[in-house]
Amino acid sequence: MPGCDCAVCASIDPCDQRTRCSALVSWRGKSILIDASTDLRQQALRENIRRIDAVLFTHTHADHLHGIDDLRPFNRHHDGPIPVYASAMAENHLRRVFPYIFCAGDGEGYRPELSLNTFDGPFEVCGLPITPVLLQHGRGEAYGFRFGPFAYLTDCSGLPDSSRELLRGISTLVIDGLRWRPHTTHFNIPEAVACANSLGIKRVILTHLNHEVAHRRDSQRLPEGVEFAYDGQVIEVK
């Protein structure tokens, strides 16, 4: 966190040096990005990401969305615009906040070429079946995504019963676990673990950690089958 001299912010452990929350799904040679984080450019350079074939938006908070202009270099690898997918509520926000991208205009200036698609149920991207999962995020909403036996649920403080049914049978879950203390818009770590346990999930990976969480020190407090995510982590799902 800028301006902070706490032990985690000053840590030289790479697992404590965190950028904004995002993920890249690799599937049969295609790359599907989850959220265009504010640190997208830095993340793409660090991980040597060469192409992005589609983007899924979980919600419209700035830390998950305002790297959208950094999608522009990836247009070089496409004959047309990159498809992006969002809920109906998020679509309205995208058109209002980024009219130069999503609203008809004169086409002048540098901007990413993106085609906006709205989901209201399961859909496919690059041949990969995806199930959106509605999440409570404070008084608002966000969406997670299920890909076969894997699910990614960031920015959530509650899970509706209907969404729990969509997560039955998964083996690996990435879930929001901001810190140990309670928070109004995010699961804290005990809440995230309890949610995963109620679903019977074998491997649980906590993401969206804040600077109160020291990766190496606090990992010792986690129960078996639960771990902290870290930047650059690769998760193989079969």
Image: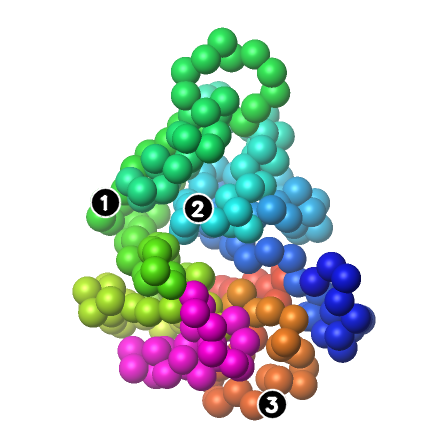
Crowding at mark 2 (Cα within 10 Å: few <14, some 14-19, many 20+): many
Q: Is residue 24 above or below residue 155?
A: above
What residue is drawn where x is 69% and y is 47%? 42
- Work out whether residue 110 or residue 100 is closer to the camera in this orientation and state it: 100
What is the span of residues highlighted in magenta in the rendered image? 178-206
Q: Locate residue 37, reporting x and y percent.
A: 56, 48
Instruction: Report the residue marked by disc 2.
Output: 60
- Work out whether residue 125 or residue 143 is closer to the camera in this orientation and state it: 143
Query: Is residue 193 a member of the stretch shown in magenta?
Result: yes
Instruction: Report the residue marked by disc 3.
Output: 220
Q: Is residue 178 above or below residue 197?
A: above
Crowding at mark 1 (Cα within 10 Å: few <14, some 14-19, many 20+): few
Q: Is residue 13 visible?
A: no
Instruction: Report the residue marked by disc 1.
Output: 120
Q: Identify the mark nearer the N-term, 3 or 1.
A: 1
Q: Locate residue 98, reporting x and y percent.
A: 48, 30
